[in-house]
Image (tube, grey):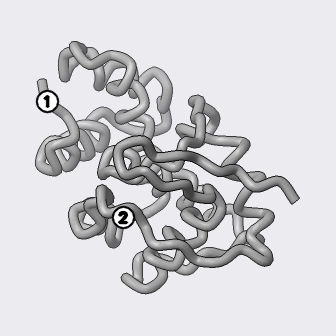
Amino acid sequence: MIRMLYFDIKNSYVWDMKAVLLSFIDFLENHNVFKFDVNEFDSRLRLQKYVFLARFYGLDMKYSFSLYIHGPYSPDLARDYYNLDNVSLEPLPESFRGIEFLELVKDKDEKWLEVAATIMSVYEYNKHISREKLIEIVNEIKPSFIKEDIEKIIEDLEKARLLDF
């Protein structure tokens, strides 16, 4: 079994990516956000988006994401969540602002998560983009979503202080 270990220079400790992932899943389940089921597509989709968005709240599990059909996707994350047997829980880093994260994602459906993660992915690489241009780009990437829905999700992300125009 390959273990992905990372050294956190700031806090001087080594952590196991899969253990942190399992702890994050446990955190989501304990806060009644969702129950992960690796056999359900929507569950895997949600976890991909939760892990992606958690990076903006101080929980960067070091997964690389690229835009895919349903927004940001990490094949390494997919590999890990299929292989969580014999993994122990590890405390989540103190840098994770879990309550703020929960306020953003609790009671959001898969479509909201997909668009929110796509917005943040585009914004992450284009920090000086205008609100209008961001809406335009996301609408091109996600043509099945109407602009009004994209605008509403951008408002949610602005209220959460994740976007600054």
Q: Nearer the viewer, residue 152 or 86?
A: 86
Q: Earlier in the sequence, mark 2 or mark 1?
A: 2
From the top left corner, tell me how far across and down residue 53 is, in percent.
40, 49
The residue tagged 1 is 164
Rendered position, 98 above or below 80: below
- Corner quadrant of residue 17: bottom right
* Amino acid residing under circle 1: Asp
Q: Nearer the viewer, residue 94 or 139?
A: 94
Secondary structure under tag 1 reads loop
- The CA distance from mark 2 to mark 1 is 22 Å
* Amino acid residing under circle 2: Lys
Residue located 37% across and 51% down the image? 11
Residue extending farthest to the right is 1
The residue tagged 2 is 108
Q: Nearer the viewer, residue 30 or 41?
A: 30
Task: Specify few, some or many for label 2: CA neighbours under 10 Å numbering under 14, 14-19, or 20 or more.
Answer: few
Residue located 21% across and 19% down the image? 132
Secondary structure under tag 2 reads loop
Rendered position, 130 above or below 46: above
Picture mark count: 2
Q: Nearer the viewer, mark 2 or mark 1?
A: 1
Q: Where's the C terminus, which quadrant?
A: top left
Q: Is residue 104 shown left or right of residue 108?
A: left
- Corner quadrant of residue 66: top right
Tag of residue 69: none
Residue located 36% across and 26% down the image? 124
Q: Nearer the viewer, residue 107 or 100?
A: 100
Q: Where's the N terminus, which quadrant?
A: bottom right
- Corner quadrant of residue 67: top right
From the top left corner, tell me how far across and down residue 128 is, in percent.
22, 13
From the top left corner, tell me how far across and down residue 164 is, in percent.
14, 30
Residue located 78% across and 63% down the image? 82
